[in-house]
Image (spheres, grey):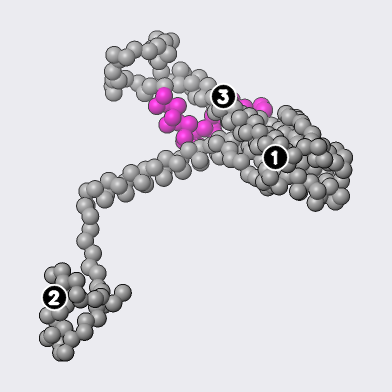
Amino acid sequence: MSRLFRYIKNDDVVKSFGELKTTVLKERPVVIARHGDYTLFLKLISDDTLGITVENTYRHQIVQDRSYDITATPNEIVSRGVRHACQKMAELSDADVNRMRLQIWKWYLQEWQHSIAGAKGIIEKELSWDDDTKSDLDEKMDMESFLHGDYQNLGNTLGLIEKYLADDDKHREKFKKFAIEDIMEMTSEDTKDRSLLEAETKRQQEGMKKHTYRFTVSVEATDKEHARQALLSYLAGDERIRVQK
């Protein structure tokens, strides 16, 4: 869900360190990139040594910390280290997103169990696999449809978070912020796909529309009638007639 926001390119980290080590870096680290709750910092360790640190800024935890002596390390090695750090942030951020989304789905599953009769038997059926099983439209909504439909209903999901995290102010606000961003991204993609499908369906139903085009053509002739005959000859395929473009 979350995206990478880059402020300093991989190949420019050493250059930026040289420009900032006597000014900004003496006071604070500089952000190289962000991804979700994770931030990649450029730090000053000494005049010849830079630090690359991945930090979870929400938990205030350092996840990865490396240093490079720029007098002994090629710029390509530093650039590769920055790229790997960004990949690490992406992996960690995706894992956090999946973990939070799964937690909300667990709460929905709890609600789903309460909404149906004979929950135990239906859950066992949902968790089993049978290639020959055919969907029965008359049955109670299945687990997947329940989760997908209700999770993307922002009001329902925020209400569920309020219910299960009523006494946890810190995590309640974090989950609400996450749900809003996640659902908005999901529904925007659904809307985009639906619009493209509708446009393609409409195009196929209506067929290719015909348009009228007007062109200006110059023809050398002795009089108007001669010009008209020359133009007709061109339209009939006479390559001796030239069109002004």
Q: Earlier in the sequence, mark 2 or mark 1?
A: 1
Determine if residue 10 is in view. yes
Q: In which quadrant of the rendered image does the C terminus lie?
A: bottom left
The residue carrying pointer 1 sits among few (fewer than 14), some (14 to 19) or many (20 or more) residues within 10 Å by Cα, namely: few
Q: What residue type is disc 1 on?
A: Glu
Query: Label 3: which residue?
Result: 103
Which one is nearer the viewer's eye here, 131 or 45? 45
Question: From mark 1 to mark 3, how far is it between C-alphas?
Answer: 41 Å
Query: Label 1: which residue?
Result: 76
Question: From mark 2 to mark 3, how far is it between C-alphas?
Answer: 75 Å
Residue 167: where, in percent of width, then height?
A: 66, 27
Query: Label 2: which residue?
Result: 232
Circles 2 and 3: CB distance less than 8 Å? no
Magenta region includes residue 207: no
Magenta stretch: give its range: 144-169
Residue 48: where, in percent of width, then height?
A: 85, 41
Q: Secondary structure at mark 3?
A: helix
Circles 1 and 3: CB distance less than 8 Å? no
Q: Is residue 27 left or right of residue 104?
A: right
Q: What residue type is disc 2 on?
A: Leu
In this view, 34 is above or below 143: below
Mark identifier at residue 115 = none
Q: What residue type is disc 3 on?
A: Gln
Question: From mark 2 to mark 1, how far is it between C-alphas?
Answer: 67 Å
